[in-house]
Image (cartoon, grey):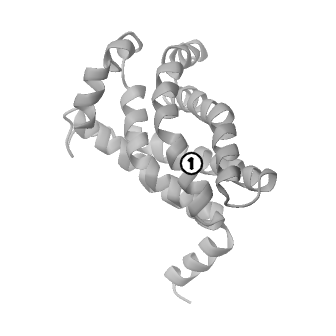
Amino acid sequence: MTVYSKLKVAFKKYPLLRGMASYSVIWPLSSLIQQSFEGKNIQTYDWWRCGRYGLYGSCYVAPTLYTWLTVASIMWPGNTIRAGMIKTFVETITYTPFAMCSFYFGMSILEMKPLNEAMAEVKSKFLPTYKVGASVWPAIAMINFCLIPARNRVPFISMCSLVWTCFLAYMKHLEKEKVPQALAPTKLLKISI
């Protein structure tokens, strides 16, 4: 049996592994894309930053997302619009804030920042990031809960999160004092173009 076929069997049997594998690629890739927007290139990329994103995405985000999606599917089974709306609403007010706070805090700890700095970053960046996320993710969540089979939900979300993680990487490396100006509507329009 080849390595590819063994991986294929493992990914089918253990969907969490598939999510972890996809996040181990997508999160560092998002960091590279964000660094490219900073003007960095192959010689100046911060590879340790990419490594932190890969570690955090694969070992923390994928398992917590998998757990949330499993719990949501048990609590509100089915792919109906009603079940999707309930899961989306609950995700928006529970998992999403948890995930955003965890991101800023966890990545700060991986950067070896002191706890008070990690907490300050969460405090200054959580709400602006949450507002942007709450305007984007409910539509993606509805598609995920209503149209995507349960076994493919973590990989689907990981693919959708490529752009979102670029935004998170942008916010993460933005100085706390510059957050309000960076999220002004005209500035966001320039970023998206």
The residue depicted at 44 percent of the width and 44 percent of the height is: 51
The residue depicted at 22 percent of the width and 29 percent of the height is: 190
The residue depicted at 61 percent of the width and 30 percent of the height is: 97
Assign the N terminus to one quadrant of the image: bottom right
Percent x, y of residue 50:
39, 43
> Could you tell me if residue 154 is visible in this image?
yes
Q: Is residue 25 left or right of residue 59?
A: left
Assign the C terminus to one quadrant of the image: top left
Q: Is residue 67 left or right of residue 41?
A: right
The residue depicted at 31 percent of the width and 44 percent of the height is: 32
Q: Provide the residue designation for mark 1.
A: 141
Classify mark 1: residues with Cα within 10 Å, few (<14), some (14-19) or many (20+).
Answer: many
Disc 1 secondary structure class: helix
Percent x, y of residue 163:
38, 44
Q: Amino acid at mark 1?
A: Ala
Seen as rendered, the residue at the extreme right is 75
Seen as rendered, the residue at the extreme bottom is 1
Percent x, y of residue 60:
61, 44
Percent x, y of residue 174:
36, 21
Query: Looking at the image, which is closer to me, 29 or 94?
Result: 94
Q: Is residue 117 left or right of residue 163?
A: right
Q: Is residue 156 left or right of residue 30?
A: right
> Could you tell me if residue 113 is visible in this image?
no
